[in-house]
């Protein structure tokens, strides 16, 4: 019974004037009963409401804990996978270095053979240095320990310099490497050297995984963004591993092509981290056997 209903009942009862003591007692008892009923309903209603709200909060906390637990489990799995991949990426060149060093020390090979051993040791040492450098760089990016030099800079200039630097590698594989800009403005706000490194890494990947054909670097404007793309006619990326392409030290593509050289497995993870720091997005499109196109966008600087 609501308060207004009780007031109405009291008002109505006031119209009834008891004529006997018994009627008076009955009316008082009836009014007390109605008041007690209202108080009980109010108490129980409030108690139930409080219990329901408490239960909802408990369920919400439980859901949050389940989400947190799931995220921690995923983090542990990723950490374990990362440690395995780091170990593999470090052990592989170290094994070669140790093996061929031992051959140099324990065998009486001719100078030509010893020179070949030395070349292998040098090559594996370079690869090991790249792996360690990229691990440190990615760790610094994720820890927020990288020093950024943000200025208005020209992404077309970055792309042109990167393409010119990589022409030698492309020519070794008889690949055509070009840059083309259809952008009305190529000015972005960012760290020139780190963004140029991203472009160079994307071109490196295109060269590594392209056996024959073309690699094209393009720049266009997309709404309020400047978009850069690196297109290749390479071996492509299988659909079942597309979700893991930007994960660090992930074995993205096990190819039987002998022309595909070693890689650190960290390049795309580094690219993603740098582009996200600049407020941009990075993604790709690919078909196995047809090729891949990697894109990233950055907010463009409006010319006055």
Image (cartoon, rainbow, N blue to C red):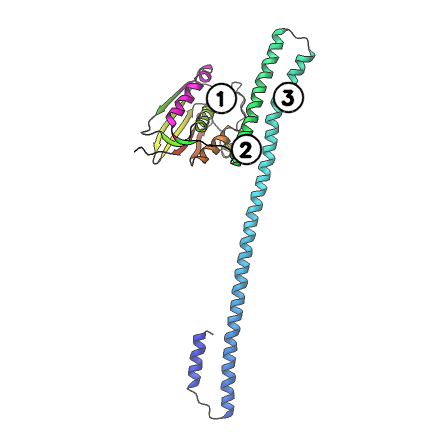
Choose the circle earlier in sequence order: 1 or 2. Answer: 2
Q: Is 117 colored magenta in this rendering?
A: no
* Image: magenta residue range: 152-177
Decide whether the magenta segment is chiefly helix, strand or loop: helix
Distance from disc 1 to disc 3, alpha carbons, whole Å, reads: 23 Å
> In the rendered view of the protein, which quadrant contains the C terminus?
top left
Which residue has dot 2 on it?
139
Separation of marks 2 and 3 at Cα, in angstroms: 25 Å
- How far is the residue under mark 1 from the one under mark 2? 25 Å
Q: Percent x, y for residue 169?
A: 46, 17
Mark carried by residue 208: 1
Percent position of residue 303, x then y: 31, 32
Q: Is residue 228 left or right of residue 34?
A: left
Q: Which mark is residue 95?
A: 3
Residue 132 placement (x, y as % from top left): 57, 26
Q: Nearer the viewer, residue 101 or 58?
A: 101
Residue that appears at 39% across and 22% down: 160
């Amino acid at each position: 019974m609501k308060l207004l209903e009780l007031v109405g009942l009291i008002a109505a009862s006031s119209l009834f004037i008891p004529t006997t003591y018994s009627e008076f007692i009955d009316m008082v008892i009836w009014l007390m009963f109605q008041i007690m009923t209202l108080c009980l309903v109010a108490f129980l209603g409030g108690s139930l409401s409080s219990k329901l709200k408490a239960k909802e909060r408990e369920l919400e906390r439980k859901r949050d804990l389940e989400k947190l637990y799931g995220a921690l489990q995923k983090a542990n799995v990723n950490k374990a996978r990362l440690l395995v991949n780091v170990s593999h990426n470090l052990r592989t060149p170290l094994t070669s270095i140790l093996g061929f060093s031992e051959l140099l020390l324990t065998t009486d090979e001719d100078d030509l053979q010893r020179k070949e051993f030395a070349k292998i040791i040098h090559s594996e040492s370079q690869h090991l240095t790249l792996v360690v450098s990229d691990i440190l760089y990615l760790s610094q990016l994720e820890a927020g320990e990288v020093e950024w030099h943000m200025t208005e800079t020209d992404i077309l200039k970055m792309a042109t310099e990167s393409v010119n630097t990589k022409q030698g590698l492309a020519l070794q594989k008889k690949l055509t490497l070009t840059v083309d800009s259809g952008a009305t403005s190529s000015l972005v706000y960012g760290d020139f050297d780190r963004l140029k490194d991203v472009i160079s890494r994307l071109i490196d990947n295109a060269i590594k995984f392209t056996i024959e054909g073309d690699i094209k670097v393009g720049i266009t404007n997309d709404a309020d963004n400047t978009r850069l793309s690196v297109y290749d006619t390479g071996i492509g990326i299988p659909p079942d591993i597309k979700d893991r392409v930007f994960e660090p030290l992930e074995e993205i593509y096990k190819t039987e092509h002998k022309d595909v050289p070693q890689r650190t497995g960290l390049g795309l993870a580094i690219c993603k981290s740098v582009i996200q720091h600049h407020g941009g997005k990075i993604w790709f499109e690919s078909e196995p056997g047809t090729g891949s196109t990697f894109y990233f966008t950055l907010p463009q600087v409006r010319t006055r």
